[in-house]
Amino acid sequence: MLIIALVISLIIVVKSADVFVDNLVDIGAALGISQIILGVTASAIGTSLPEFGSALIATLSGSVDIGVGTVIGSNIWNIAGILGISATVAGVIRTNKEGLNRDWLMTLITGLILLFFMFFGDINWVASIVMVIAYSIYLWLLIKSERGKNQEDAVKDEKDNKDDYPSGVQFKQDKKSINKKTIGFVIVGLLGLIVGCRLLVFSAVELASIAGIPEMIMGLFTLAIGTSIPELVVTLSSAMKGLHDLSIGTVLGSNTFNILIGIGIPALIMQVPVEPLSLSFDAPVMILTTILLMVLIRMGKMKLNRIGGIILIATYVSYAIFRIFIFP
């Protein structure tokens, strides 16, 4: 019964995140919020809402190990599992050098920030403030980068319009209106996230207790993989369609959000305890996996090829075996 509840809650969380983000973007567009801001945040943040919601609810309900485990485990799975599977299935994932350097470096810095504060014991409000500021800086860099690209596209479009339409003709962009249905879906999506995450955490805690599985293990694997379903779908489909920058960008952006916001916000509310093994094993593996990704891409001449994908999958399998059977 608890397993059924776990599966149902995962479905509720994933679908609620989709509904919430899609309709929130519509409201943002109707209010005149820049498409730059909506564009650079929707994919990574939207796919990370299940992890964030689970971490927040777990922390508030006292199951801190599940919250931290979900975030760290999800980040390892995102790179070693999701990108590994995507590269293996698609054959190759190409990447943009500028975007990769920015997003990868931020993901690495984010992991180091987490590891740094873990050395001092519980993650408290000081770490939370640093994490939120770091994410704000990253968001600013993304917006600045996208604004530059959009201005170049606007100049090009303006030149094309001059060739196609009479001089003096002006065009106004139709404004969308906010309807009650959209607002209702945002509320439904948010409520679905809250209820789904609460059910998810409850069923995971009970299953862990009955089976004698440590909560950290439940968070590192079961919930981490389950809540990362949106990233897997987006990344794999993007890689298959040739949208390579989106596939890698979604994973790296999601990993940055998971730590800086997924752990940063709960730490602002209450102290997040650090398990010794997370400090000595899980967090270092997360950072080493991030470094391995860049090494494989560099070796593939700015491409993550099938061999690199297989290496990443093997890395995740090895990590899972060590963590579950050798360092339980």
Image (cartoon, rainbow, N blue to C red):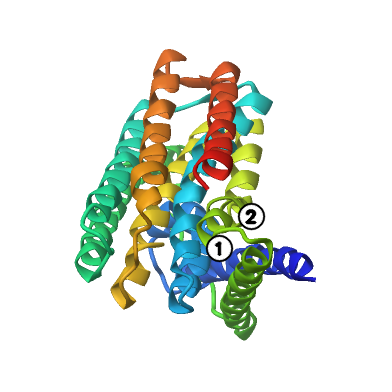
**Pointers 1 and 2 in contact (C-beta within 8 Å):** yes
Nearer to the camera, 247 or 111 = 111
Q: Please give the name of the residue rendered at 58% of the width and 27% of the height, measured from the top-left corner.
A: 314
Q: Is residue 120 left or right of residue 21?
A: left
Question: Where residue 50 is drawn, which disc sits there?
Answer: 1
Q: CA distance from mark 1 to mark 2?
A: 9 Å
Pointer 2 residue: 226
Indicate which disc, 1 or 2, sits on the residue closer to the N terminus. 1
Q: Is residue 94 left or right of residue 277?
A: right
Q: Is residue 147 visible?
A: no
Q: x, y percentage for residue 252?
A: 43, 42
- Neighbourhood count class around disc 1 (C-alpha, 10 Å): few under 14, some 14–19, many 20 upward: many
Q: x, y percentage for residue 225?
A: 61, 50
- Tell me if residue 120 comes above or below residue 290 in the rendering: below
**Which element is circle 2 on?**
helix
- Give the quadrant of the N terminus: bottom right
Question: Where residue 40 is drawn, which disc sits there?
Answer: none
Amino acid carrying label 2: it is Gly
- Tell me if residue 103 comes above or below residue 300 in the rendering: below
Q: x, y percentage for residue 289?
A: 43, 33
Task: Report the number of numbered marks.
Answer: 2
**Which element is circle 1 on?**
helix
Q: Is residue 63 left or right of residue 116?
A: right
Q: x, y percentage for residue 85?
A: 63, 32
Q: Please give the name of the residue rendered at 63% of the width and 55% of the height, measured from the top-left corner.
A: 226
Q: Please give the name of the residue rendered at 29% of the width and 73% of the height, measured from the top-left corner.
A: 268
Amino acid carrying label 1: it is Pro
